[in-house]
Amino acid sequence: MPQHTPTRFPPRRDVAATVGVAALLLVAVAAFAYDRSGSLVAPALAYLSFSLAEFAVLLTEAGGPAPF
């Protein structure tokens, strides 16, 4: 029976849960920023930075650009 060797990355379901929680926090921060400022610039910048970070993680995991 092969031994399980620990990896330095968490299982994919943990990563998916983390991304889901981060997306919910992004919505909360964007709503708070919009409520405080009345402008869509702050929420748009928050969403843009989240999208770029998510894309960077995809590139890092896949080792190249996404096929789509």
Image: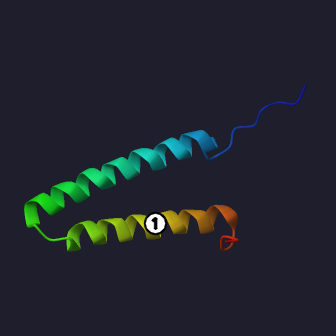
Vertical placement of 56 versus 29: above or below? below
Query: Relative to residue 4, is residue 17 drawn left or right?
Result: left
Q: Is residue 48 left or right of residue 4?
A: left
Which residue type carries mark 1?
A: Ala
Q: Tell me which colouring the rendered structure shows.
A: rainbow
x 62%, y 47%: residue = 9
Pinpoint residue 63: horizontal percent, then vertical percent.
Answer: 69, 68
Kindly identify which residue carries mark 1: 53
Placement of the C terminus among the 4 image quadrants: bottom right
Q: Residues within 10 Å of mark 1 (few under 14, many from 20)?
A: few
- Please report the residue visible at 11 percent of the width from the left and 58 percent of the height from the top: 35
Q: Residue at x 46, y 66 (%)?
A: 53
**Quadrant where the N terminus lies?**
top right
Question: Could you tell me which secondary element the residue under label 1 belongs to?
Answer: helix
The residue at the point 75 percent across, 37 percent down is 5
Q: Position of residue 13 (x, y in %)?
A: 59, 40
Q: Quadrant of residue 34?
A: bottom left
